[in-house]
Image: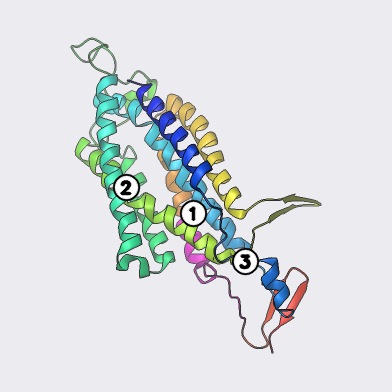
Amino acid sequence: MYTSAALFMTIVSVFSILLTYFFLEENYVGIISEEEKNQDPYFVLPKFDRLPVLLLFYMWWLMCGVVCVESMAAPVTIAMYNWSREDAVLYNGIIQTVSCVFTFIVNFSLASTKLKTIDNRLLLLCGLVFFEVFFILHMPLPFYPGPLDRPGTLNSTISEVGRCEFDWCDSTPRVPLSLYLVICSAIIGLGFPLISSTSSSLLSQIIGPRKQVFVVRKMAFILSFQGTVQGFFAFTGAFSQFVVSLFSTRLFELSGYKWIMIYHWSIVTVAIISTLFLWRRLIPLKMTPSNGEATRYKLGTFYRM
């Protein structure tokens, strides 16, 4: 039961590697090459705005961290609804399948309908609002029913019914099951694609048509990372999944899911405020500045007359 998904993904991954190796043709569409630069001696590629790029890195950290909440669905539902381990795996699998249907519909709409003409910043903000609603409703709010059932409070063996076996169970209410089904399928399924697709799109637009090199400066040290901004963008998400998974598991054992939800709600709130604050800077790189406008590039500053 637990290994079948891993075996299936192993087969899919091997198949993907073969497709990539034999059929992928690398082509930097839209990237300005050195030949194109040499053809125009007056060509200048402006520097991109680093603060919005860092904000989008933060968005990717946020979104990949939310995946950890989904990975904890089984122990959370066992504690809240007394599901057996088998039922938790089955029911959460169905919930995530429904969530994927919503994600597919949104991604298809972004690619094939008038939804793709909407400002990416607005779509990103909508995705963050969906996440905000999800984490607020997933908190153990005081008016929810409870507390959770402890071992010995039900006339059933532990092999038949799961229970909450932690000290915090006595003071923790449960999210109503009907509400849990809605937020973990529809709400989270709508939020994921709105953040992932628009974050990647905005990042490409902001950095412009360049082979991307990212430089991090900290105090007196300068660390240069040769590679692409997109590579560090992906690394941010992978590191988020590693770190958030570790402390979320420990936090769940110590205090339940309350502080996990508060953490995620806090970073989503910061993301919404930051998006509104940097709204006018989350725009594509301006290749042709206005006349007389000072524009920075790698060799200094230039003016268009």
Looking at the rendered structure, the secondary structure element under dot 3 is loop
Tell me if residue 118 comes above or below residue 193 in the rendering: below
Whether residue 147 is visible, yes or no, is: no
User: Residue placed at 26% from the left, 39% from the top?
Assistant: 180
Of the numbered discs 1 and 3, the one sitting upstream in the chain is: 3
Q: Earlier in the sequence, mark 2 or mark 3?
A: 3
So how many labels did they put on this image? 3
Query: Quarter of the image containing the N terminus?
Result: top left
Q: Is residue 176 above or below residue 115?
A: above
With 98 as the anchor, is 165 left or right in this view? right
> Which residue is under mark 2?
189
Is residue 107 among what the camera can see? yes
| Magenta extent | 270-288
Q: Which residue is label 3 attached to?
A: 49
| Residue 223 covered by magenta stretch | no
The part of the image, by quadrant, that contains residue 39 is bottom right
Of circles 1 and 2, the one toward us is: 2
Residue at 31% across, 50% down: 104
Amino acid bearing label 1: Val
Residue at the limit of the structure toward the front, as seen here: 22
Q: Give me the residue at 58% from left, 75% from top.
A: 286
Q: In the picture, which quadrant includes the C terminus?
A: bottom right
Of marks 1 and 2, which one's residue comes earlier in the chain? 2
Residue 270 is tagged as: 1
